[in-house]
Image (spheres, helix red, strand yellow):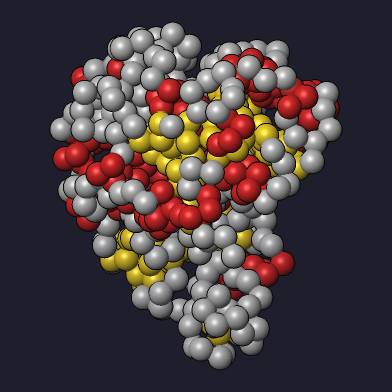
Amino acid sequence: MNEPARAKAAKPLPKPAPESVPYWEAAKQHRLELPKCNACGKFWFPPSQSCPHCLAADFAFTPVSGRGKVFSFVTFHRVYHPAFAGEVPYVVALVELDEGPRLLSNVVGVTPDKVTCEMPVQVVFDDVAADVAVPKFKPV
Amino acid sequence: MIDPSRDLRDACAIVGAGHSRLGRVPSVSSLDLLVEAMRNAITDSGMSVQDIDGIVCRGPDDIYSHHQQIGARLGINVKFSTSLDNGGASQILAVAIAAMAIKAGMATTVICGYGRDSWSRTHSSEEARVKNQTTPDDQLPKEFAPEYGYFGAVAAHAFGATRHMHLYGTTREQFGAIAVACREHALRNPDAQMKKPLNMAQYHEAPQIVAPFGLYDCSLRSDGAGAVIVTSRERARDLKQPPVLIKGFGSYNNLRGWFADDNMVTTAAKKSGEIAYGMAGLGPDDVDCAQIYDCFTYMVLTQLEDYGFCKKGEGGDFVASGALRMGGRLPTNTSGGQLSEAHVEGMLQVVEGARQMRHTYPAERQVKDAEIALVSGHGGNQVCHSTLILGRA
Ligand SMILES: [Zn+2]
């Protein structure tokens, strides 16, 4: 009876590639873990089965600080997916972690007009479903 | 070994150019649009379809063995045939591969083209209109994008615009100068999709799409196609049209990604351009008009810097000076570009570059005394780039 005329669209959930499963498993427990090369010691993202810095295949998902800065960002005004109709305007940012890799994410907890390049940010986790948490970033 | 500057510079020429109906062309497939453009290019060249012995083409990336389907519709078998997968960089690459194939004796006369049905695809239903997506769903990212509400090419390129504005103080007013210049050119082109004038006030008042981009920073959704015919310089002499020499080409691919390094601000146009200039024995001061891949206003600005028409960071002042208009230092996207003529992934820019070199336009559309045209192509997740330098014979 009280169902809205149009069912509320759900936001897309990440569909992990095989190589990304450990990343999302860690995120679920509110830990940000990225592949780190055991040969050259560098982190990379997105996850893959060999190090793009030295091509070694010996690596481990390793916690990072979760701190970084906004490298660049955009503000969505147009709705491309009905689930985001109530969110616009929202910020999608490229966050450069202190460890080097750049992650695409949302900057939350601040209005879009306050977001700037080089702004320091810290990871927070958004429990978007019972078994899925998505890393997002808030200003430090 | 082939030395491009010795063996490929001026070895081949564009001898035919054509385009299809542009804009909203419902109920015509991308394949038929491309064949329409190819028919027009063949007629333009004065040749017969039986003279074609090579095809290098591309269409929507969900069509398997695209060149085969084009050959079937043209009704020909050929020596050399393939389809490309470098996004908007493919179309210039097609011309380059044609020239290389001719030089290698793999073919004598190669038709190159690209056709799409993007207006129709994005207007087939309300859902399609909202998604505004031309890529098939199964080719889209499944993680690290949709969960953040990150969709589409507007946002991807807007990241570069934000970074450039941060580093160099570039303004939206400067992006607007590009949109306005392209619209001025389109109004002189009777086949252009956009028919109404655009001024700076309208640019600023238009809705924001993905900031810093507003509506007029974004290229069009178009149905349409373009094609050119490439043959050897020797054969070109006997043909109907003034041959347009292929003086140089180059490609470069920042495969580490758009978000890696400084690729959003210094694009692969830089190295692609250096290679093409090297082959042609020319530099930016020699270029009289440019057809720059304008998927978004910002991309014109940064590529003009990367090609050396001004220094990195000075593109805003360059475009705001009126340089891109007819009579300016570098008339750019003189048929209206993808911002105002039609977005056919750079193919119409190859066509326009060739036409400018023939000097057959009415005076209002002709870049006066133009001897050299530079054409750019950009795509493949924003990091594949190609450059073509054309000249009057
Ligand atoms: Zn390594």
Q: Is residue B262 shown above or below B159?
A: below
Quadrant of the image containing the N terminus of chain B: bottom right
Tell whether B43 sits left or right of B147.
Answer: right
Residue B250: x and y in percent read 48, 52
> How far from the left and from the top, in percent, is residue A88?
41, 37
Q: Is residue B351 visible?
A: yes
Q: Position of residue B197 (x, y in %)?
A: 30, 12
Camera-side residue of B26 and B33: B33
Position in image of residue B79 (x %, y %):
79, 41
Taking the view exactly as shown, the residue that stands out farthest to the bottom is A39
B136 or B74: nearer the viewer: B74
Q: Residue at x 41, y 31 (%)?
A: B392
The foreground one among B313 and A37 is B313
User: Can the viewer see residue B179 in this picture?
Assistant: no
Q: Specify the quadrant that holds the C terminus of chain B.
A: top left
The image quadrant of residue B49 is top right
Can you tell which quarter of the image residue B32 is in?
top right
Residue A30 against residue B86 in the figure, above or below: below
Query: Which corner quadrant of the image does residue A25 belong to?
Result: bottom right
Residue at horizontal 49%, vertical 88%?
Answer: A41
Taking the image in four quarters, ligand 1 sits in the one at bottom right
